[in-house]
Amino acid sequence: MANNFPNNNNSSQIEDAELIDLGAIWGSVKHRWVLLLACVVVAIAAAGGAWRMTPAEWIATAALQIGQLPVNPTILIEPPAQAAERFNQRQLQDQALVSAGLPLDELKDDRTRLLRKTLKATPGKNTNFVDVSVAAHSQEDAKIYLNAAIQALIKTHDARLTPLIKNLDDRIATNNLQMAEAISEKTRLEANLKNASTSPSGGKFEPSVIAINLISKQDDLIRGLTAEHAALIDLHTKTNTFPTTIVDAIYVPERPASPKLSIFLAIGLILGALIGTILAMFLDRNRPKTAG
């Protein structure tokens, strides 16, 4: 039991010291309130000046729809998450910078640094859409830079889509040619069978059966080609096969996204109050302190 008294005394002393310190701080603030107010005013004015000197930034946004390849079953040219990741790669950024007429070295031009830093893409959940954004020091530049980045991705996707579209077109052309040949052959066989049946000697039984079988095979071939043609045309429709495109026009708000005046003023207020409190305590360091 004897050992508990010193511990309790120490705890009371610590609490008293904390109360005395808080009381001293509050006393200094009340005593030097003019100084505190002046520090706050100066800090807010400095924050306003810093806000004016900070370059404004506009953010351009757009939504992309990832295209589909002409295969059965249809698949996306690229998964949305993978397409979104491309915007973080220097290769696509370099293509966008070249298209926008900017240097590749971010140390040489702040616009290049800003593009590399702010170019972002977010894939849509369970959709084939990707939201893309970028910042620039003007509305027009933001729109130009975002369009350059999007076109770089579209160019990459078109490089994969175009050969498959050509292959699909070739298959449709081949199907049309085979269909024309099959119809022409059937017409020829039907004409030969009709001529043989109307001739004075009459058509012989065995050749007639062969001709009928050949015509039946041509019918089967034509039905197969017709079904194939319908499948190819359906695959070629805009519903199943299409390139990567911008869903809506690139949007850039009229007002800049940053800097925010309210944030600068709040920081100035906090810093001014903190500096004013520290100065007040420093000037009152030798002033008698009272608790309570």
Image (cartoon, rainbow, N blue to C red):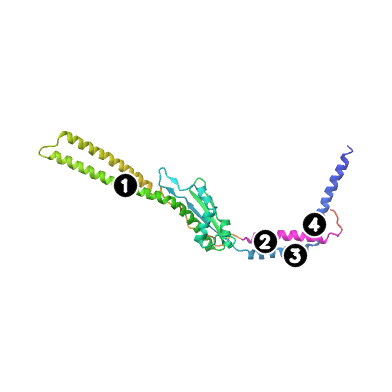
Foreground residue, 197 or 162? 162
- For label 3, the residue is 38
Residue 155 image point, x, y percent: 46, 54
First-in-chain label (3 vs 4): 4
Query: Outermost residue toward the top?
Result: 206
The image position of residue 133, as x and y in percent, is 54, 55
Majority secondary structure of the magenta segment? helix
Name above or below for residue 264 compared with residue 241. below
Which numbered disc flags the more N-terminal residue, 2 or 3? 3
Please report the bounds of the magenta region as a residue range: 259-287
Residue 266 part of the magenta segment? yes
Q: What's the CA distance linking mark 1 and mark 2?
A: 71 Å
Check contact, mark 4 vs mark 1: CB within 8 A: no
Kindly indicate whether the residue at mark 3 contacts the one at mark 2 (C-beta within 8 angstroms). Answer: no
**Residue labelled with disc 2:** 265
Q: Name the residue under label 4.
A: 26
Could you tell me the amino acid type at mark 3? Ala
Q: Which of 216 and 60 is in front in this view?
A: 216
Instruction: Indicate yes or no whether the magenta region holds residue 17.
Output: no
Q: What element carries label 4?
A: helix
Mark linked to residue 174: 1
Callout 4 amino acid: Trp
